[in-house]
Amino acid sequence: MIPFSFLDLCPITEDGSAAETFTHTVELARHAESWGFTRYWMAEHHGMPGIASAATAVLIGHVAGATSHIRVGAGGIMLPNHSPLVIAEQFGTLDVLYPGRIDLGLGRAPGSDQATARALRRNLDTDPEAFPRDVLELLAYFEGRAPVHATPGTGQQVPVWILGSSLFGAQLAAALGLPYAFASHFAPAQMLDALAVYRAQFRPSRYLERPHAMLGYNVFAADTDAEAHYLASSWQQSFVNLRSGRPGRLPPPVEGYAESLPPQGRGLLAHVLSCSAIGAPGTVAERMRAFIAQTGADELIVTCNMHDPKARLHSVEIAASVLRETNDA
């Protein structure tokens, strides 16, 4: 049986607002809870006009307060942007408010460009050991081993995950005996190598007895294959715009968008969408089950960016149905 979770990038549409995004996020989280999702994660991004989850800890509290039992967390907090003590206090507070429901995923990228990183008032530390040191410092606050007492924070049982899209995160998660989440939903190139490294080098710890790898996966589902490809074009446009240096809000779908791109653009999308299922329920089921069989994923975290909130809800419901049927089988 494979647990399945959801990653919400909290998209702001071209004709929408952050307030509307947060309303849709709460609605989707409540449905995800009823559909059997294990976790509902949101990610820290800064300087991104189309992503509303910059104040990630605040939004986690909002979603946790609007739901009853689903785990809510960060996928993830970009630790270079913060003091580990502040993160221990924030997530310790969340764990006090919502006991046993808070997850903390940690990433080492700033989640922004250099100008935004400077605006966050943090020095850009290029030392490769900075992130491991910060992770160890954060763990020490939770465990009461630091010279400064985190209140709340010390003694709180907040599960810490390492996030990554390369071998670095896999090696760190394995060395510390922590669960590992790979960003295969947008950076699939090193997925299989990272999984092999994580599993081979994993050291059992007080946190985890055996390796646990969760993989990101895009799902764009609809009643027909044609409709699903049409709806997926919003995210495709957004990604191409981002890679072209023109980040913006999530645009409405466009018929035949991928086919209209030059070869370089089509190649970029084919690479990024290699860990995706686009289609009707049967197509999605076939693709998702093949992905699980190929990777041996311990958990799947699906994501879906669509311009129409109702279409997005329907897509996530189809994904949940497919995963429940897969587990039943």
Image (cartoon, rainbow, N blue to C red):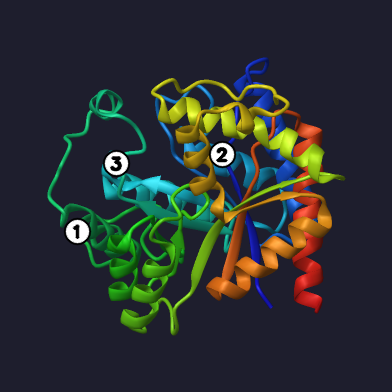
The earlier-in-sequence mark between 1 and 2 is 2
Q: To which residue does mark 1 refer?
A: 133
User: Residue flagged by tag 3: what amino acid is it?
Assistant: His
x and y, in percent, of residue 234 in the image? 64, 29
Task: Name the residue at 54% across, 45% down.
Answer: 270
Describe residue 328's horizontal placement relative to residue 252 as left or right: right
On-image quarter of the N terminus: bottom right
Look at the numbered disc 1 and give the secondary structure of its residue.
helix
The earlier-in-sequence mark between 1 and 3 is 3
Task: Name the residue at 26% across, 44% down.
Answer: 80
In the depicted view, which residue is nearer to us: 108 or 206? 108
Q: Is residue 304 above or below residue 183?
A: above
Q: Residue furthest left?
A: 127
Q: Is residue 222 above or below residue 289?
A: above
x and y, in percent, of residue 289 in the image? 69, 68
The earlier-in-sequence mark between 2 and 3 is 2
In the depicted view, which residue is nearer to us: 19 or 115? 115
Q: Residue furthest right?
A: 223
Q: Quadrant of residue 250?
A: top right
Instruction: Using the image, tell me which numbered label, if any, was put on residue 95.
Output: none
Between the C-alphas of marks 1 and 2, the distance is 28 Å
User: Residue flagged by tag 2: what amino acid is it?
Assistant: Leu
Between the C-alphas of marks 2 and 3, the distance is 20 Å
Task: Give the crowd class for mark 2: few <14, some 14-19, many >=20 residues within 10 Å.
Answer: many
Task: Name the residue at 63% across, 32% down.
Answer: 259
Task: Give the crowd class for mark 1: few <14, some 14-19, many >=20 residues within 10 Å.
Answer: few
User: Residue flagged by tag 1: what amino acid is it?
Assistant: Arg
Describe residue 140's horizontal placement relative to residue 53 as left or right: left
Q: To which residue does mark 3 refer?
A: 82
x and y, in percent, of residue 222 in the image? 81, 44
Q: Residue furthest top?
A: 15
Instruction: Using the image, tell me which numbered label, if any, was put on residue 9.
Output: 2
